[in-house]
Image: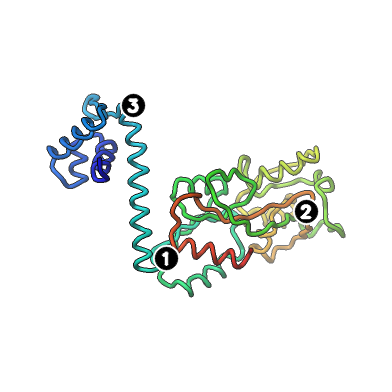
Amino acid sequence: MDIRQLRYFIAIVEERKISAAAERLHISQPPLSQQLKSMEEELGSKLIERSGKFLELTEAGKTLYKYALKMTQLMEEAKMEVKEVENGVNGRITIGINTFSVVELPELLQQFQKQYPNITYKIQQNESSHLCRLVRERKVELAFIRLPLDLENLSVLYLYTEPFYFITSKNHKPMDHEVTLDEIQNYPLILPSTEGLGVHYLIFEAFSKFNLQPNIIGECSDITLLMNLVSSDFGASIVPETLLKLHKGYPIHAQKISSTSLNASVGLIWLKNHYLSKAAQNFVDLFRSRFC
């Protein structure tokens, strides 16, 4: 078998009809049918069987399809890398950004753009665990995430660890020291995330570590609304330092929570043991020079 036959097989599997696959591949049906027959004879296994109007994979066919996808993907990656070596740095970087973002990103993107003016960008925001999945699926090449998370199959560049802050309206007298979770557990708290997501889990885990029961009155992933709710004394909240840097000017008190109680690391991730575009490599190198 060769890569061309594997591409033919993928088209047949995904279109589920020889006629549709032939149209997709811009060839006639008889040669495509012959290629499928040739593959089955070479492997000594039936790969496709008819089920009504459509074609279905046999167990042997499912195995071949899995490897055909990997092999054609590796071929495309090889072609991309060879072209970049020959032509220099071009193309597009796809970057995932955690919901709370990275304060330094605009400045560093501007610096990167000056060095590599031909690069274009696709930047999308999402929750950290979802970004890990997008990187594993190769839908995003790089992503900024909050830790801890399962980083299996991922390379990570640890950027920094940031503290969390306890924020209240101006109506509350601030304490004159770094606060602990024990001191704030009875305040009516609005969490800056929703159940099942990273920051929500991180905060609950921190309280649980000290056997504390926080007084949670709500959750709000809309940060502008959250800051307005806190400002109006609807409730207090616990937020990462990044959020305060991005949302300034609100009439609130912000008190640092002791690092022994709560903090979080920020990292830049990419898929381990897979091709990383030269543009993405340069982007990683820029961040490494800044933070490491």
Which residue is rendered at x = 61% and y = 67% of the image? 290
Name the residue nearer the viewer: 167 or 273. 273
Q: Residues within 10 Å of mark 3 (few under 14, many from 20)?
A: few
Quickly name the residue at label 1: 120
The mark that comes first in sequence, 3 or 2, is 3
For marks 3 and 2, give the one nearer the viewer: 3
Q: Secondary structure at mark 2?
A: loop
Q: CA distance from mark 1 to mark 3?
A: 42 Å
Which residue is rendered at x = 37% and y = 64% of the image? 84
Name the residue nearer the viewer: 55 or 233. 55
Name the residue nearer the viewer: 193 or 201. 201
Q: Amino acid under label 2? A: Ser
Q: Amino acid under label 1? A: Thr
Image quadrant occupied by the C terminus: bottom right
The mark that comes first in sequence, 1 or 2, is 1
Residue 145 position, x and y percent, is 59, 52
Q: Amino acid under label 3? A: Glu
Residue 174 position, x and y percent, is 84, 58
Q: Secondary structure at mark 3?
A: helix
Can residue 92 be seen by looking at this rendering?
yes
Residue 108 position, x and y percent, is 56, 68
Q: CA distance from mark 3 to mark 2?
A: 54 Å
Quickly name the residue at label 3: 59
Image quadrant occupied by the N terminus: top left
Quickly name the residue at label 2: 259
Q: Residues within 10 Å of mark 2 (few under 14, many from 20)?
A: some
Q: Residue furthest bottom?
A: 114
Q: Secondary structure at mark 1?
A: strand
Q: Residue furthest right?
A: 176
The mark that comes first in sequence, 1 or 3, is 3
> Count of labels shown?
3
Q: Residues within 10 Å of mark 1 (few under 14, many from 20)?
A: some
